[in-house]
Amino acid sequence: MKWWRSAAKPPIDKLLVREKDNSAESELFFRRVLITICAVFLALLAVSGRLVYLQVLHHEQFTLLSDSNRVRLLPLPPARGFIYDRNGVLLAENLTSYHLEVTPEQAKDLEAVLAAIRERITLTDADIDRFRKLARRTPPYNATPLRFQLTDDEIARLAIDLYRLPGVEIKADLTRHYPLGERGVHIVGYVGRIDEAELRKLDPGQYSGSTHIGKTGVERSYEDVLHGRAGYEQVETNAEGRPVRVLSRTPPVSGKNIYLSVDMRLQVVAEEALEGHNGAIVAMDPSNGEILALASQPIYDPNPFVNGIDSGSFRKLNTSKNRPLLNRALRGVYPPGSTIKPLMALAGLEYGVVNRNTGVFCAGVYRLPGGGRKFHDWKRSGHGSVNMDRALAQSCDVYFYDLALNLGIDRVHEFLSRFSMGRPTGIDLYGEKGALLPSREWKRKFQKQDWFGGDSLSAGIGQGLFLATPLQLAYSTAVISQRGDNYAPRILHATQETGTRGTVLTPPRTLPPITLKNPRYWDAVISGMIHVVEGGTAHKSRSANYRMAGKTGTAQVFTLGQNQRYNAKRLAKHLLDHALFVAFAPVEKPRIAVAVIAENGGGGSATAAPLARKVMDAYLLDKYDPAMIAGIKPDPDTQRDGSN
Amino acid sequence: MDRISAGRLLKWIRFDPWLVLGLLAVSGIGLVVLYSAGQRSLDLVIGQSIRLGLGFAILLTLAQIPPHYFRFWSPWIYLVGILLLLAVMVAGDVSKGARRWLDLGVLRFQPSEIMKLAVPMMMAWFFANKPLPPRLSHLLAGAFITALPFILIAQQPDLGTGLVVGFAGGIALFLAGLSWIVMFILAGLLATVIPLFWTFVMHDYQRQRVLTFLNPESDPLGTGYHIIQSKIAIGSGGIYGKGWLNGTQSHLDFLPEGSTDFIFAAFSEEFGLVGGCVLLVLYFFIIARCLYMATRGADTYGRLLSGSLTLIFFLYAFVNSGMVSGLLPVVGLPLPLFSYGGTSLVTIMAGFGMLMSVYSHRRTPTR
């Protein structure tokens, strides 16, 4: 009997006795248990369904997550290739050095840690500034360098207390070092820390482990050769990111060593010769385009740049009015002055405007037909009657005024372009400028003016709008010396896999030769250039040991008034004329072509030609001042095989 | 008796071989997994073996005691438990923001642990002499018996234990024959109470747990980290698992609490879906066997006690595996017989002991 159906409510104790029915209750319990067991089954089924969902349907996704949890790729940066000169003189190497790193996140109280470090080793404000700057750019769990080039003593002092300095580590690495310091800095360049802009452009696969990259010079131009190929270590890390074991390893491939075409002894001779001037000397082998020396003064020590030069020193270099950071050989643009005259003479011959015997009377002044402005010769008294040979030897301006006017700027532009005037020569160094070979179009476009006859006259003596780099002058001189055979200037002589002795020579980059209607035009101009040295403007620089052909130049820095005279004594140094000289030697079989520019040096014959002579003497006669080239010796460790 | 043979001893000792076999199987697998999940620490395994041994000893001891003793002691145990809970409220030790511990000088324990057994016992005791299905006044009394310790525990706060105690009482009501109408009304009531509960009763960290459960990725470094890493461990295990001792999530410390609350994830990572299903089947076997044993109870007390205790075991297994696989919120319940740790193991084994006592004394009613 069901209790809720009973009409009358019996007393409770009676109900207990009467209504308690064990078998019915057992049955009820059994039914409830059946329901429960179904519910349990369904609940556990739901869990196993969840397992299927995670372990079968999404297995790959979670495997990926699990692997990315534990597997890290640690980049192994390659060792950068060394740089040598053509004789194996070491120019750039990697030294083991120790630096101090701080991981801001682990340091907790960064200020306290920095102060604690400061108690133990010297830490300049510049170090701390640089550290903060770097730390801002990287996530706080990354180690940031604080001090470089720790001494053994400093390492010892820090090492004892390192356990008390959380997040502070002493790390060994390879630091780029330039053993010759400032020598050849404009060629070799330097490496520096990778900055943000570079980081965006770089292949992270190759650079994620690298901290440095070539910033200028060969270091920059041959970055891909020097850098090498990055390796990787697949490591398993725990939840704290600490590597537990190495899963696989792909070793890095070191960068190649580079042998430059430069002879460091000659480089030093050129730099020493320029000492006291701002300027450049470019010396190249005309028979293959190899740069033998590429001096630009002033020079500076690249070593401080490697780990970040402090801002004070940098400002001093950057704002100096001598502009030491400027590579004048490639990027200095100067009016070529009279050094352009051999090319003008060639143009005159090629276009039939003159022949080598055409005579012009020079009275020291030239007037454009139809009156107007007077154009003076550098020699106020005039040269009298001159032919091409004499005009070159004496650097007669009037002859070239007349020639330029008769040629017209269009033909001048066309012809000089073939000698790479107004455009880069294509040297394998970063940052070369094209300078400016004026043309009608250029003047209209940039000066919004028509071309006048006077402009042609100025161009004819390498003045006015005309600008050229020392490299362009050396290159065009080299082409003349080869009578049109044409090699692009280059600095890379050979490459070498690290750990081997064999080298791979870089073949000369032959450009299409410049052919003239009559090859004897070359002879006419070269003859004129020989007479520059032998009885002409550069006769004082004549050598008894070899024959040289050259051309002096004196470029005006400012324009004289119509009736003013140039008086060096009355002008400030920075307004003095630039002294230029281009030359090649020996004339019979040219082995070297040189361009010299000494800023505000005065006259080309007096100042520039003797500098070229010093370089040529050293190279052609193999005569070097032992004191000057002390320390410039082939590296005994890393010699390459004797046969190049 | 001249000789006591092993066979005769086994016959004399009251126990259910099927259930003991099931428990041994799960604990055995548990020890193997623990060795791996505990970073190959033998100390951990030995410690757990000792606890298991102690647990089985308690189980077998209790199985020998006739259930009418339990029935007699039920209200007293319950009363002492309630008093201890009140003592905790007044003089308990605070640890991790919760007042759960009672320090009696020599013994430091959580009285709430007692209630996991005391509530089913008390419920069974209360309904044992009432006609079933229960009438409303009895239902309310039963609800009060459950609600009192539940509230005392939940305010500590200890959501996990509170849940177990409340569930034990609720399941006792259900097994006692709670009418479906009442259940529907209660369900409706619950639907209205939960929002209020959410707003006024729950602590921030508990709310956060629920929210994190709903979207663990919302807080991947905080509360969600456990679940995300646990899901990665299970999911990356695949069908056959990474193999014993090869679990990377657990060995490299990505999986938090890998040898305690999250041991199921460590297990699933190494043994895969196959291992997980085997374990779930074993749990189902144990629960089904226990429920069968409960139906064979001589009277209401035995049946209700056995049923509630079984479902406490089920609750542990279900909530833990559901939590670890991201199906349920993170509630700190261990996986029974698997997770490293002592207290709950002892409680569960004691429960099985009483259950086995009810079954082995099924021909002797408790009255």
Image (tube, coloured by chain):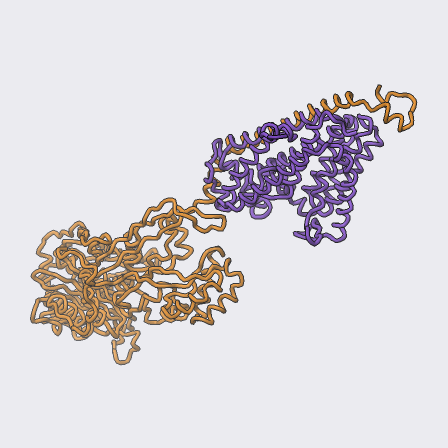
Write down the quadrant of residue A631 in the picture: bottom left
Identify the chain drawn in purple.
B
Q: Is residue B180 above or below residue B62?
A: above
* Residue sitting farthest toward the front: B2
Displayed quadrant of residue A455: bottom left
| Residue B311 seen from this side | no
Residue plotted at (81% across, 22% down): A21
Task: Give whichever of B257, B197 is nearer the camera.
Answer: B257
Give the quarter of the image for residue B206.
Answer: top right
Residue A319 percent location from the top left of the image: 38, 70
Quarter of the image that includes the C terminus of chain A: bottom left
Q: Which chain is orange?
A: A
Percent from the top left, x then y, of residue B168?
72, 35
Tell which of A115 and A401 is nearer to you. A115
Q: Residue at x 50, y 37 (%)?
A: B269
Residue closer to the observer: B237 or A234: B237
Picture quarter with the N terminus of chain A: top right
Residue at the limit of the structure toward the bottom, as seen here: A569
State how many labels appear: 0
Where in the figure is residue A148, as x and y percent of width and height?
38, 65
Residue at image location 57% in from the left, 33% down from the top: B24
Q: Is residue A542 left or right of residue A159?
A: left
Q: Is residue B226 left or right of residue A542?
A: right
Tell me where residue A617 appears, x and y as whole percent.
Answer: 13, 69
